[in-house]
Image (cartoon, helix red, strand yellow):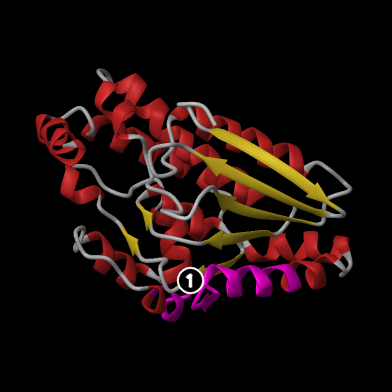
Amino acid sequence: MTTSGSILTEIKESVATVTFSHPASNSFPSVLLQKLTDELCNLGNNDTIALIVLKSEGTGAFCAGASFDELLSITNLEDGSKFFSGFANVINAMRTCSKPIIGRIHGKSVGGGVGLAAACDYTFATKDSAIKLSEIAIGIGPFVIEPAVSRKIGKPAFTEMTLTPTQWKTPQWAKENHLFSEVFDSVEELDDHLERFVISLASYNQEALMEMKKVFWEGTMHWDILLYERAAISGRLVLSDFTKEALEKFKK
């Protein structure tokens, strides 16, 4: 793993396991976002793959969202929009990928990490997998990931999360609101159930799985435009003095 993070893929029989990692709590700089986008697109076009498992490295956070270092380095609207478009690219790649994507959410998720979990088709989590949308507290908002999160948990629950940016929502809350499909007491128990689940799912008719994936995401074609419009909003707000000062405080 380098300071820019890494994307590693292991293919076993017809299951591809994609692991992302970054030393800063598995957060995402733009380079890593692009690598994940490219990998998901490649796997979606691989006829030998039936499904994809998305996970992150380590035993700490599942994903801390956007890289604070890169957010602080943004100095103009173009760069801001480009950075947040990286999350739009990943979510759209997950949405249009022809394979079901199963999320292994072993730990906490913040901001963009919640968006990744929401863009999975089925999710396994643990009792340590709390979630939080902290964006409003730093002067921006979860604009790009909103369509994916609201699609899973509904607008009222999304509003609740957004307007309480310092509060962690429990894994049970996430399950009750359909962000998590299953929650387990330990990572070991999660992995045991995940292994059995993917073996069973991969044994089904691959063509049927591909057609069902289209059904799951019906009505989202406009995201090809919407998510980039949202990225422009975030790209503008990240330039504010409020956000710059808030990011510095969070880093300290």
The location of residue 118, given as percent across then percent down, is: 49, 60
Q: In this rendering, does residue 182 appear at all?
A: yes
Along the line of sight, the residue nearer the viewer: 62 or 122: 62
Relative to 14, 251 lies left or right: left
The location of residue 103, given as percent across then percent down, is: 58, 60
- In this figure, which residue is indicated by the disc labeled 1? 126
Q: Amino acid at mark 1?
A: Thr
Along the line of sight, the residue nearer the viewer: 238 or 125: 125
Relative to 91, 110 lies left or right: left
Position of residue 20 relative to residue 75, above or below, is below
Q: Residue at x 74, y 54 (%)?
A: 99
Q: In this rendering, does residue 97 appear at all?
A: no
Q: Residue at x 51, y 50 (%)?
A: 58
The answer to if 106 sits in the magenta stretch is: no
The location of residue 167, given as percent across then percent down, is: 21, 65
Q: Residue at x 73, y 72 (%)?
A: 197
Crowding at dot 1, Cα within 10 Å, few <14 / some 14-19 / many 20+, comes out as: many
Q: Residue at x 43, y 49 (%)?
A: 63
Quarter where residue 129 is shown: bottom left
Rendered-image quadrant of the C terminus: top left
Position of residue 6 relative to residue 211, above or below, is above
The answer to if 184 sits in the magenta stretch is: yes
Q: Secondary structure at mark 1?
A: strand
